[in-house]
Amino acid sequence: MELDSRIPGGPIEQKWDKARFEMKLVNPANKRKYSLIVVGSGLAGASAAATLGELGYNVKCFCFQDSPRRAHSIAAQGGINAAKNYQNDGDSIFRLFYDTVKGGDFRAREANVYRLAQISVNIIDQCVAQGVPFAREYGGTLANRSFGGAQVSRTFYARGQTGQQLLLGAYQALQRQVSLGRVTMIPRTEMLDLVVIDGRARGIITRNLITGKIDAHVADAVILATGGYGNVFFLSTNAKGSNATAIWRAYKRGAAFANPCFTQIHPTCIPVSGDYQSKLTLMSESLRNDGRIWVPLKPGDTRPPDQIPENERDYYLERRYPSFGNLVPRDVASRAAKAVCDEGRGVGPGGLGVYLDFSDAIRRLGKKTIADRYGNLFEMYERITGEDPYTVPMRIYPAIHYTMGGLWVDYHLMSTIPGLFVLGEANFSDHGANRLGASALMQGLADGYFVIPYTIGNYLASAKIEKVDTSHAEFKRCESEVNERVRKLLSIKGKKSVDAYHRELGKLLWDYCGMARNEQGLKKCLAKIPELREEFWQNAAVVGSGTELNQVLERAGRVADFFELAELMCLDALHRNESCGGHFREEYQTPDGEALRDDEHYCYVAAWEYRGENQAPVLHKEPLKFEYVLPSQRSYK
Amino acid sequence: MNLILHVWRQKGPGEKGQMVRYEAKNVNEDMSFLEMLDVLNEQLVLRGEDPIAFDHDCREGICGSCGFMINGVAHGPQRGTTVCQLHMRHFKDGDELWLEPWRAKAFPVVKDLVVDRSAFDRIIAAGGYISVPTGSAPDGNAIPVPKKKQEMAMDAAACIACGACVAMCPNASAALFTGAKISHLNLLPQGQPERYERAERMIAQMNIENFGHCTNIGECEAVCPKSIRLEVIAFMNRDFLRAKWVEGEEPVLASQG
Ligand SMILES: Cc1cc2nc3c(=O)[nH]c(=O)nc-3n(C[C@H](O)[C@H](O)[C@H](O)COP(=O)(O)OP(=O)(O)OC[C@H]3O[C@@H](n4cnc5c(N)ncnc54)[C@H](O)[C@@H]3O)c2cc1C
Ligand code: FES
């Protein structure tokens, strides 16, 4: 396997222009002769399917929910970044690029990130024109806020529902193409395999979730926009259905998986309340603008928060990071919370929580101002916990939120399998080892609206794509493998629930490959996962049949894939003997507990190649070169 | 707490269904309603029985996947709350609850509590968009939008298409859903060029889909988890009427060049 990133030459600000100019074009009249598959209808998938439909291609788009509008992107709260500099506060494309590369702890590709920053401005224009009701000032111009460690105001938002509004914009554009007959939308359908013929991605195998029917779909190119794999941890802020199946199947058919251990843990989530807990809820990062984070000074202090006097509290972020205080980036804030809880100073049930306290802000600004700013979040918190954050400090704890790792793609967003493109959270491309707030929505839409329409045209115009149909032997082989796998899952009929196995796997990963990792723990985890997986295949309780709506079967299939992915994540974490971004290896830290990168040995993308059942995957390295933002140690002190 | 549940069980579309009684024991008050069902389902599976099927995904009240009737009320007793965000502390020991799927001709039952809401997607496809091909947009600040207009549009755009409005309406009307989208787009300057055509086309599709007529009962507003206001229906009706008027005007304008 060779990793050719296909980064265009020339100065960074001209690379994308140059690439676009050099790309081959598909004659408009010929576009309808090409058929494309888009798996996923989140921001990345819906924007791609709609745009490709507009261009005249024949598009089939798939999602597992009952409607494309319900994709996980809908849940994003905070906002989307763009280098518009409408606030005249010193922002620029270069600054957004700089912040993203630095925030990613120097593990992202400069050329990709620069392009993202360039495109960010077009995204806002496009969304406004679609009718996305972004927040506005009294004069009618677009409003911005600052977000997650940025020193400029470049985040656009629609109340606390930015993801919803952006997704509805893309979904509506998609439905327009559906009505024009250019996109066929196939909901409640899950992709279970990728079909590769003569080295090119040529189609997928799907299961209809209502009837159980297994179908084959052929195309000239396949686009995966299936989101992140945070649910490998069982408890995460992702939607319950989010899964890794599509990218994992593609990995097993030859697409390299990059940086699987780079996962993001969000510092402000509502803590776990019991064993029945099915997911974790994010409390927007914006709360840290006014809330102060603290724990009791003494371990084991169980007094209610209002009875702990000021001098017996530890505002540990303000203490450790005087210049950024409560606004340090996510990875730093999460690790600090873990550290105080490990010292026995955590609050709430099980001691896994820290206070996020608004009493100072309420005193200073008044309850009304706080309600205007965070009213809906406070309501959500109260609905879930039954506690009123206006009077009792919130309790928060870090939770898995986002996965920076994903399928390896080149500058054209093509994976190591020609004809297989990967967009959005499913690829690894732009965030390095840590993603900045409000940058995932930007990346998903950049990929879908503005990158793939060019690069896929270039692929179609320059590749020699033979004619095949679903009667091809390889389609038949993949289809029978999928059938066999469904049959095998249904035959387990064990005694322990699929969720119980998933929880156990998640706990292992959280303990050993979560916020802090070390060699010993990772090795232990690598020994335990295969045992647990073995047991799963012997003893998972899978009921019902394959020819009906069977939600247990769906989950079992996803969990089976998570088991395999979990192992790759640990392998990747174990091989990376440095700390960077969300990957914190306890052996590699500065004397005051900060992440210690090793640029000399690890300044590369780790891309793993699948070599078959019971064989170790092979590591390939794409070296990263920094010409515009020189690597430095991130400091928020 | 312990609860008695009566749940609608139906194997598949078009099959006969029935209410089945279950006991949910040791329910924790911090659980969400769906987590309570998860626990029950886990027990059913371990007994080799078919678990209760229900739609859900985000469990944060935003994707619109979840929803069923609890004692005859869409999404249950708490106002402005989807079932995934409804917590068990709002119930008490010994409560008896009846769970049924949305009932509407336009939403056929798929299985148990799962229904087919694809009619909503077809209403959007009929005109619930602004036609602006990627790349053809002017600068975001080129057209200022008064803050008040934007806020009103946002209120309407908050709809999550869960279908509670239809399920609760005695006529099974989709007026709140359709009105919300028409209001969102037609309030904004960007939505003006297609304004009247949009209203006509979406309403026509709504009628094709077997939804009933709106007779201003207001149950939809009362159960809407996003508190979408009845005003959106009035707005829709106004635009529909104006559409007739504008249509009459059009040939004249066209002949003037
Ligand atoms: C609670 C929360 C808040 C967030 N807030 C922000 C924010 O404020 N700003 C920001 O920038 N980012 C935010 N993020 C991150 C951001 O929302 C996601 O990274 C982004 O939306 C992912 O978009 P996507 O299009 O790549 O995938 P998704 O939206 O996850 O879509 C995946 C699609 O793939 C389909 N799919 C998946 N697997 C299959 C399969 N096997 N077969 C068929 N279809 C499949 C699904 O049906 C779905 O349509 C947030 C994330 C969370 C969890
Ligand atoms: S599961 Fe998404 S709204 Fe309830």
Image (tube, grey):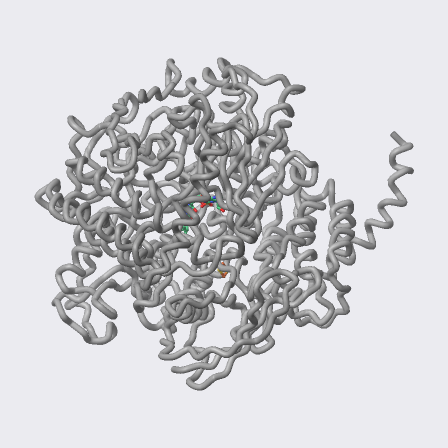
Is residue B22 visible from the viewing direction of this image?
yes
Residue A418 position, x and y percent, is 43, 23
Q: Quadrant of the N terminus of chain A?
A: top left
Residue A370 position, x and y percent, is 41, 63
Residue A170 position, x and y percent, is 57, 41
Residue A5 position, x and y percent, is 35, 21
Single out the residue that lies furthest toward the bottom.
Answer: B94
Q: Residue at x 12, y 43 (%)?
A: A519
Is residue A136 visible from the viewing direction of this image?
no
Q: Residue at x 42, y 26 (%)?
A: A414
The quarter of the picture where residue A603 lies is top left
Closer to the camera in the image, A579 or A137? A579
Q: Is residue A515 above or below residue B42?
A: above
Q: Is residue B9 left or right of residue A397?
A: right
Closer to the camera in the image, B27 or A441? B27
Q: Is residue A637 left or right of residue A156?
A: left
Closer to the camera in the image, A1 or A488? A488
